[in-house]
Amino acid sequence: MHGSIAHNEGTLEHNLSMKEKGKIKSFKAESDFFVIAKNKDFSYVQASLITGRKHQLRQQFLKINHPIVGDEKYFLPSNTAANHLMLHSYQLSFEYQNKIKKYQVDPPLEFKNFLKKINL
């Protein structure tokens, strides 16, 4: 995220507006987050979706003036620190046929290199 997020953990609750079938609709969006590391210019955050809305995290972090680095859709004018969207889904879990399925994937090299570049 751009900027140093003030709180080290919390819950984001917003009403997000989306165009659906030609009409603007509002949807409740809720996400938990905690800061893994931060400096004066950036925050490295882990977020968990409570609800699952289209572009939820991208919109929510923009709403608190901490857009995701590299986001070309939901950004502030100074969002030029990276050439890629620095958003990575590292873990997915769900229940299927009464069993919990869990998958994890390491971040791509661009993501790791960017964290090194910004000293996080």
Image (cartoon, helix red, strand yellow):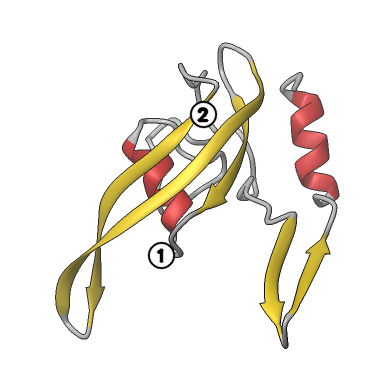
Question: In this picture, is 74 found above or below 37?
Answer: below
- Disc 1 marks a residue whose amino acid type is Arg
Residue 61, by quadrant, is: top left
Which numbered dot is residue 69? none
Q: Which residue is mark 2?
A: 2
The single residue placed furthest to the top in the displayed view is 40
Q: Is residue 59 left or right of residue 86?
A: left
Q: Is residue 61 left or right of residue 117?
A: left
Q: Report the front residue among 1 and 46.
A: 46
Question: In this picture, is 78 found above or below 70?
Answer: above
Q: Nearer the viewer, mark 1 or mark 2?
A: 1
Identify which residue is drawn at 32% across, 39% down: 63
Q: Is residue 108 left or right of residue 7?
A: right
Question: In this picture, is 48 found above or below 9?
Answer: below
Q: Report the front residue among 91 and 38.
A: 91
- Disc 2 marks a residue whose amino acid type is His
Residue 54, by quadrant, is: bottom left
Identify which residue is drawn at 54% across, 33% down: 1
Question: What is the CA distance from the residue labelled 1 to the residue labelled 2?
Answer: 22 Å
Expressed as whole percent of the image width and height from the top left, the position of residue 46 reads 63, 39
The single residue placed furthest to the left in the displayed view is 23
In terms of secondary structure, where does tag 1 sit? loop
Expressed as whole percent of the image width and height from the top left, the position of residue 24 reads 15, 70
In terms of secondary structure, where does tag 2 sit? loop
Q: Is residue 78 left or right of residue 41?
A: left
The single residue placed furthest to the front in the displayed view is 98
